[in-house]
Image: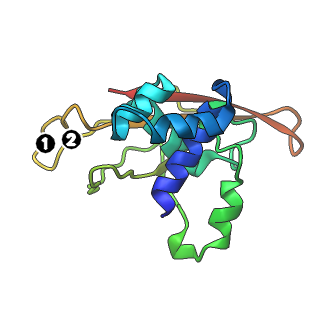
């Protein structure tokens, strides 16, 4: 129940207000659509599933954790951080933490799934990610990598912070 619900809830939060009848009209459009699946969602929202899925996947971790998060990356009707923290630790979405130092890792990601990493450090001018299949080739065009760059800027040491985010979809 959780994954389809959260995707449809995200779509309702992001696109429902753009319909004259609000979320209710969006739901009618999705249910009564002439197409099915992702094509139906794309037709109703006017947005590609590639963009919707990247934003939704980012929202699953960043929503209610990143201060001043861009509205396109939020599930506005729920506090996901509260939901995650109520789960047993093994069920919580916990990214693998890595530093900006070079690291290599083999990760199996099923179709429609996501691997989360939190890469951090200081004084790093640029970073690059190289993704390959287990045979060393470039992944298919269906594969998607997205990066949410979160920079915390301190106004006064130890007090309030501001943040900026950049969402990058790497085709």
Looking at the image, which residue is at 61% across and 34% down?
25
Splitting the image into 4 quarters, where does residue 165 fall?
Answer: top right
| Towards the viewer: 56 or 120 | 56
User: CB atoms at circles 2 and 1 under 8 Å apart?
Assistant: yes
Q: Identify whether 82 is placed above or below 91.
A: above
Residue that mark 2 sits on: 132
Looking at the image, which residue is at 52% across and 71% down?
91
Splitting the image into 4 quarters, where does residue 72 fall?
Answer: top right
Measuring from the top left, give residue 103's x and y in whole percent: 35, 48
Measuring from the top left, give residue 155's x and y in whole percent: 85, 32
Classify the position of the C terminus by image quarter: top left
What is the number of callouts on the image?
Answer: 2
**Element type at marker 1?**
loop
Which label belongs to residue 136?
A: 1
Looking at the image, which residue is at 68% across and 57% down?
81
**Element type at marker 2?**
loop
Q: CA distance from mark 2 to mark 1?
A: 5 Å
Which label belongs to residue 170?
A: none
Q: How is the image coloured?
A: rainbow
| Towards the viewer: 143 or 94 | 143
Q: Identify whether 84 is placed above or below 160.
A: below
Judge whether residue 128 can be spotted in this image.
no
Q: Identify whether 38 is placed above or below 84.
A: above
Measuring from the top left, give residue 80's x and y in whole percent: 66, 55
Question: Label 1: how many residues lie within 10 Å, few (<14), some (14-19) or many (20+)?
Answer: few
Measuring from the top left, give residue 100's x and y in whole percent: 47, 42
Judge whether residue 64 can be spotted in this image.
yes
């Amino acid at each position: 129940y959780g994954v389809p619900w959260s995707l449809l809830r995200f779509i309702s939060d992001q696109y429902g207000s753009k319909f004259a009848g609000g979320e209710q009209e969006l739901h009618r459009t999705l249910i009564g659509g002439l197409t099915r699946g992702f094509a139906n969602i794309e037709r109703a929202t006017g947005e590609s599933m590639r963009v919707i899925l990247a934003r939704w996947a980012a929202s699953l971790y960043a929503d209610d954790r990143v201060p001043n998060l861009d509205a396109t990356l939020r599930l506005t009707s729920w506090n996901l951080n509260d939901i995650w923290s109520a789960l047993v630790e093994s069920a919580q979405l916990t990214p693998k933490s890595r530093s900006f130092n070079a690291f290599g890792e083999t990760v199996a990601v099923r179709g429609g799934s996501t691997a989360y990493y939190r890469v951090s450090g200081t004084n790093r001018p640029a970073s690059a990610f190289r993704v390959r299949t287990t045979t060393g080739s470039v992944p298919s065009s269906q594969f998607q990598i997205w990066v949410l760059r979160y920079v915390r800027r301190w106004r006064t040491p130890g007090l309030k912070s501001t943040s900026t985010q950049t969402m990058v979809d790497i085709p």
